[in-house]
Image (cartoon, coloured by chain):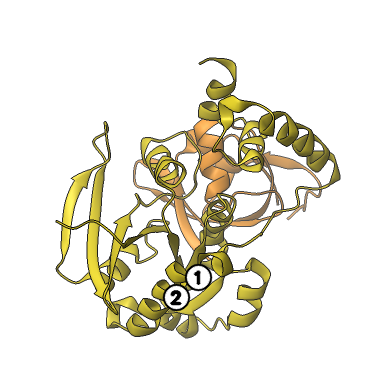
Amino acid sequence: MSMVENKTMNLDKLKPGQECKLIDVHLTGANGQRLMDMGFMPGVKIKVLRNAPLTDPVELEIRGYNVSIRHAEARYIEVSL
Amino acid sequence: MKNTGEYIVAVAGQPNSGKSTVFNMLTGARQFIANYPGVTVEKKIGIYNYKDQKIKLVDLPGTYSLTSYSLEERVARNFLIDEKPDLILNIVDASNLERHLNLTFQLLEMGLPMIIALNMIDVSQNRGFKIDLEKLSEELGVSVLPTVAKKGRGKDDLKLLIYDACNNKESYQNDFMIDYGETMENILTELEDKIAADNRFAGHLPRWMAVKLLAGDPEVRTMFSGN
């Protein structure tokens, strides 16, 4: 296990069970706003719970509740492990 | 139909806050469905009497936020701006406080009298949360009442609080302001002054408009650029 510190990645690359910290949301407009409304803010912890059978959506745990988003959106969420 | 002397209370809350359950708890069977003018969004209205006072509850669409990106959000916020209800009853899920406060803050920025029903307080306690009600109330400048609407708990207290708030609006009008930090506040102040001096925006809260402008709100931007 090599721990990569300070290296950021996109949330859609994480596997179920992995946890990360949100660095930035690179989405604007309605989608970016909705993610912020759901609590996707820099510094918040996110845990990837599971992928749906057909890969989309991905279920996440954030701030004590579960949210499902598409991988297309998760791709624009920058996180660090 | 006598329509005089009724208090209008807007019921606002995020999806899954138990908004409908609180609504039903307060109004029982006296409900009817209308539409918000010009849109296909359902407008649920409920009426009850309290101490010879007619109280009319208007159920705002359940939204996570009050931006202008979705129709429901526009409907909710335009109702608050245009109709200026006597009171906002904000339903907050006590077991998901952090997420629900996002809407609470935005409601507070509308500058209307407001109270909070902290719903599902039992679920929250079962999850091991201890919410300091007095502290929360003090920080927000809003009366906070714990309820378990599903079991009818808090009904009488809530009715009393709504009645009292409608009768003493000034004391429930809060001056809560989010401090957006020095850089932002300087820009906001400048915008507020410009907005306040512009008679096109009479009747709008300058600070609210300034905040929405900075947030890039499409509808408010349109108000500015075109007529």
User: Quick check: A75 left or right of B22?
Assistant: right
Q: Which chain is orange?
A: A
Amino acid tagged 2: Asp
Name the image quarter holding residue A18: bottom right
- On the image, the x and y values in percent for residue B55 come to 30, 66
User: Quick check: B206 left or right of B193?
Assistant: left
* Subunit ID for the residue under disc 1: B
Q: Residue at x 18, y 58 (%)?
A: B2
Q: Nearer the viewer, residue A42 or B45?
A: B45
Badge 1: residue crowd in 10 Å (few <14, some 14–19, many ≥20): few
Please tell me the numbered disc located at residue B79: none
Q: Residue at x 63, y 67 (%)?
A: B140
Residue under pointer 1: B168
Instruction: Report the quarter where the N terminus of chain A lies.
Output: bottom right
Name the element at disc 2: helix
- On the image, the x and y values in percent for residue B150 come to 29, 77
Residue under pointer 2: B164
- On the image, the x and y values in percent for residue A77 come to 61, 40
Q: Colour of chain B?
A: yellow
Q: Residue at x 56, y 36 (%)?
A: A32
Badge 2: residue crowd in 10 Å (few <14, some 14–19, many ≥20): few
Name the element at disc 1: loop
* Subunit ID for the residue under disc 2: B
Above or below, B128 against B217 in this view is below
User: Quick check: B50 left or right of B82?
Assistant: left
Distance (Cα) linking label 2 and label 1: 6 Å
Res B132 seen here: no
Q: Say if mark 2 contacts mark 1, CB within 8 Å.
A: yes
